Amino acid sequence: KNKCETYKSVSLESAASGHGQESTTTENTVSPVSISSLETLWDQELQLTQTALFVNPKAYPAWEHRLWLLRSSRDLVSQTYFQVLMQKERKLCDIMLQKDERNFHAWAHRLTVRSLHKQYAQKNTEIEPQKSSESILNSEEFRFITERILSNFANYSAWHQRSLLLIQACRELGIEERCALVIRELEWLHQAYFTDPDVESTWIYHRWILYGELQDGITDETREHILITELGSIQDLLAMEPNSTNALLANSRILKSLNRGDEARASVELLIKCDPMRKGFYQDLL
């Protein structure tokens, strides 16, 4: 028997023995009594893994067992119970990320929980999943990620989660709306790299905004306008932080994208002076 079948059998047998009834099962159904018993068993297992995670927040087995419980519960427990589980999981992730905002286990778990909830919502018409870009960008999840980034710009996981939500939001956007979203994200990024230009995660996200999936469908003319506008912001930063390798690297890439070869080469030469150990890498930009 696999784990799911084993838990189903155990719950049925325990429920039957407790009520003086003979244990019976069918392949695809669970009696109301067994569902209640199973939910109690699930609560005990979830409490066990939570206790383990509070002791060791990066324990792979505890996270994996908890994830197995959630995946298995979709077809075994009541809809109300599953909804409560999803809420508890989000709260647990919030607690774990407050303790360590870069705990990639908690971030990955949060992402999986959101995916499970979406799958369950699509299967059960009583629950309407959020689909519009507006609902995504105004969601509790998006606000939470924004808060995590603002508390620590070096939070790679939060930047990654933000990019995933933006990709999801863009599926519902037209070209003009997508352009507006890109411009808004770049303006929001300014506070990050002007505050601390040495944080690499900010610049990784910055490069993705300029050259990643959000640019799909945007015209060359509009993309050029976005790049020229952003170049001005980068050069304002360089006026204050002339030796910022991250800003110089972004400056060089934008100049190359705009086919301003002489300026790009001059920017790369400055990069090499500031960071000679990566000379070969910078030369490959040209």
Image (cartoon, rainbow, N blue to C red):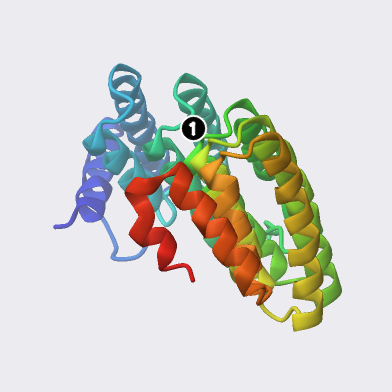
- Farthest residue toward the top? 55
The residue sitting at 42% across, 65% down in the picture is: 283
Disc 1 crowd rating (10 Å Cα; few below 14, some 14-19, many 20+) is many
Along the horizontal axis of the image, is 193 left or right of 221? Answer: left
In the foreground, 143 or 207: 207
Vertical position of residue 10 compared to residue 153: above or below: below
In the image, residue 166 lies at what x, y percent? 66, 58
| Residue farthest left in this picture | 1
Percent coordinates x, y for residue 98 in the rendering = 52, 22
In the displayed structure, would residue 181 be above or below residue 79?
A: below
Horizontally, is 2 left or right of 154 in the view? Answer: left
Residue at (70, 45) in percent of width and height: 189
What SS does tag 1 mark?
A: helix
Quadrant where the N terminus sits is bottom left
Measuring 56% from the left and 39% from the top, which residue is drawn there?
243
Q: Nearer the viewer, residue 145 or 80?
A: 145
The residue identified by callout 1 is: 93
Tally the marks. 1
User: Is residue 137 something that shows in the picture?
Assistant: no
Locate residue 201, reporting x and y percent: 51, 43
**Nearer the observer, 198 or 141:** 198
Q: Which amino acid is tagged 1?
A: Cys
> In this view of the protein, can residue 209 be seen by the observer?
yes
Q: List x then y, in percent, for residue 209.
A: 64, 60
Residue drawn at 70 percent across, 49 percent down: 234
Which of the 4 quarters of the picture holds residue 14? top left
